[in-house]
Amino acid sequence: MAPPVVHSLREQIREHILEGIVGGRWQPGERIVERRIAAELLVSQTPVREALRELESLRLIESAPNKGARVRELTAADLKESYPVRAGLERVAAELAAERLAGDTSALEREVAALREADRTGDTEAQARHTVAFHREIVRAAGNSVLLHTWESLGIEVWTALSIRWLSPTPRAHAEEHARIVRAFAERDPAIGELLNSHVLSCAPQI
């Protein structure tokens, strides 16, 4: 059995703030007050400040002297910027992972099953969570730690959740799109890399 993952205090606070942004607790343009978060979580302001700096590096937070931190007023163009980079990374990941996933697509199938339920109920939070988990399984299966680290550094989960929550005017059936990818892996489709590339680009916000 793998040991439990232990997250640092800073990481826990970052996830708490992220959940607040994605879940709508803090709206675009709204100020995030360090001392309030520190009091709420019973921690000092130092790890809160560190967590906010990380979110600023992901372009989710903006700060100014004497004004504190605010949730960025993100546009469709902001959300779209990372998709070509992500598409290229996932194309490489799919090609590296193709043989491994052809032999066992069970992890991908589990996420598709969860997406079917999320699509049925219109649960956008679950759609985002399982969409990202599906793609993370492909990147992990590539077996390249540099690739995985680079992909994770793009803040995929956050951008996906925000795209679905803020910029999806009509419901989208996520499960069937991903089921087609599973079939392509199982059938050893030689164009699997291009399929992933096109799929990711098709998910980018339209502007």
Image: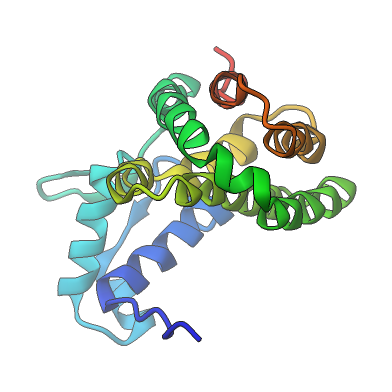
- In the picture as drawn, the residue positioned furthest to the top comes out as 207
Placement of 102 over or under 5, stated as above or below? above
Q: Residue 193: x, y in percent?
A: 54, 24
The residue drawn where x is 50% and y is 61% is 19
Q: Residue 199: x, y in percent?
A: 62, 24
- In the picture as drawn, the residue positioned furthest to the right comes out as 120
Residue 35 vs residue 204: left or right?
left
Q: Residue 125: x, y in percent?
A: 66, 53
Q: Residue 133: x, y in percent?
A: 58, 53
On-image quarter of the C terminus: top right
Query: On the image, which quarter does residue 119 sit in?
Result: top right
The residue drawn where x is 61% and y is 29% is 167
Placement of 152 over or under 203, stated as above or below? below
Query: On the image, which quarter does residue 92 sit in?
Result: top left
The residue drawn where x is 61% and y is 22% is 190
Q: Nearer the viewer, residue 22 or 5?
A: 5
